[in-house]
Image (tube, rainbow, N blue to C red):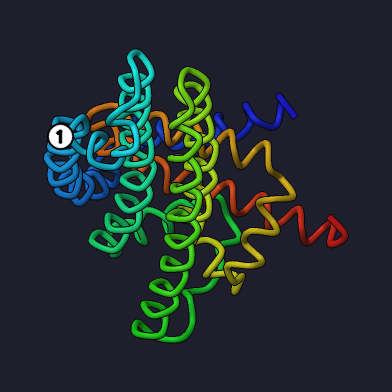
C-alpha cells in the first residue's frame, strides 16, 4: 500500500520532469492555469478576510454560550469554511482550467500518449458531443464534492479534533477528485465512462491517492497550480494508462 502510494507520487514527479524536457509544451499549459489562478486567488483572499464574520453569521446558536466555547466554536467554523473552500476551489479550478485551456491540455495529453507508445485514436463523437459528456461528468463530480464538502464542514466544527481531521480528509478526497478529473483525457479516448473510471482507479486506490494528494497539496502553494497543472495532466495520463492496461490483463480486479 505504501509502495503504491509513493508510486502515484512518482507519477506526478515524472510529469514535473517534463518541464525540463519540453518546456515550451508545458508553458502552453501554464498560461490558462495562470489566468484562472489569479481570479481564484483574489476570491480566496476575500473569503479568508471575511471568514470570521461568516463564521459568526452561521453560528448564531453560540451567541449566548460562555467563553471559551463560543470563541472555539467560531474559530472552528472559520477554519472549516477555509478548508471546505480550498477543496471546492481546487476542484473547480481544475475543471475550469481544463475547460479554458482544453486545446492546450489535449495537446499535452496527446504528446504524452505518443511518447509512451500505443496511443489511442482521437476521441470519437465530435466536439459538441465530447463537450456535453465533459459537462455532465464535471457536474456529477461537483455534486459529489458539494456533499462531501458539507460533511467536512460539519466535522470541522468539532473543536481541536475537527481542525486536524477536516484538512486531512479534504486532502484525501480532494486528491481523489483531482485524479478522477485529470484522467478524463486518457479514459475518454479509450471509451471508459465515469463509472468505469472510478472502478479502475478505486482498484488502485493507494496509487491514485498518492498521485492525487501530492497534486492537491502542491495546488495549495500560491501559484503552484500554474506550474503543476500541465505536469498533472502528464502524470494523470500515465496513471490512467497503467490502470486501464492492468484492468485489461486482470479483468476480475
Closer-to-camera residue (111/210) = 210
Whether residue 15 sits left or right of residue 244 in the image: it is: left
Closer-to-camera residue (89/36) = 89
Q: Is residue 61 above or below residue 180?
A: above
Closer-to-camera residue (159/129) = 159
| Residue 114 seen | no
Residue shown at the point (35%, 59%) measured from the top left: 107
Whether residue 100 sits left or right of residue 163 in the image: it is: left
Q: Is residue 61 above or below residue 187?
A: above
Quadrant location, the C terminus: bottom right
Quarter-wise, where is residue 206 in the image?
top right
Q: Is residue 148 above or below residue 16?
A: below
Q: Position of residue 213 (x, y in %)?
A: 51, 34
Residue shown at the point (42%, 48%) measured from the top left: 233
Helix, strand or loop for disc 1: helix
Q: Position of residue 176 (x, y in %)?
A: 54, 45
**Crowd band around label 1 with a 10 angstrom C-alpha radius: few (<14), some (14–19), many (20+):** few
Residue on which disc 1 sits: 50
Quadrant location, the N terminus: top right
Amino acid at each position: 500500500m505504501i509502495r503504491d502510494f509513493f508510486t502515484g507520487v512518482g507519477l506526478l514527479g515524472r510529469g514535473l520532469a517534463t518541464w525540463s524536457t519540453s518546456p515550451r509544451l508545458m508553458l502552453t499549459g501554464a498560461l490558462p492555469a495562470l489566468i484562472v489562478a489569479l481570479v481564484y486567488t483574489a476570491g480566496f483572499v476575500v473569503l479568508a478576510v471575511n471568514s470570521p464574520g461568516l463564521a459568526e453569521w452561521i453560528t448564531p446558536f453560540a451567541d449566548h454560550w460562555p467563553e471559551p466555547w463560543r470563541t472555539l466554536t467560531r474559530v472552528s467554523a472559520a477554519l472549516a469554511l477555509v478548508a471546505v473552500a480550498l477543496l471546492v476551489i481546487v476542484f473547480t479550478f481544475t475543471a475550469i482550467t481544463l475547460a479554458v485551456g482544453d486545446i492546450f491540455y489535449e495537446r499535452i495529453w496527446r504528446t504524452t500518449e505518443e511518447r509512451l507508445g500505443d496511443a489511442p485514436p482521437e476521441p470519437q463523437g465530435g466536439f459538441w458531443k465530447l463537450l456535453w459528456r465533459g459537462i455532465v461528468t464535471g457536474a456529477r463530480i461537483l455534486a459529489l464534492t458539494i456533499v462531501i464538502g458539507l460533511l467536512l464542514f460539519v466535522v470541522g466544527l468539532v473543536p481541536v479534533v475537527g481542525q486536524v481531521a477536516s484538512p486531512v480528509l479534504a486532502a484525501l478526497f480532494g486528491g481523489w477528485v483531482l485524479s478522477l478529473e485529470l484522467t478524463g483525457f486518457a479514459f475518454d479516448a479509450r471509451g471508459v465512462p465515469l463509472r468505469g473510471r472510478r472502478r479502475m482507479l478505486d482498484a488502485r486506490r493507494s496509487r491514485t491517492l498518492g498521485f492525487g494528494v501530492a497534486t492537491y497539496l502542491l495546488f495549495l502553494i500560491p501559484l503552484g497550480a500554474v506550474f503543476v497543472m500541465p505536469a498533472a495532466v502528464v502524470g494523470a495520463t500515465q496513471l490512467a494508462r497503467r490502470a486501464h492496461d492492468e484492468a485489461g490483463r486482470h479483468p476480475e480486479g
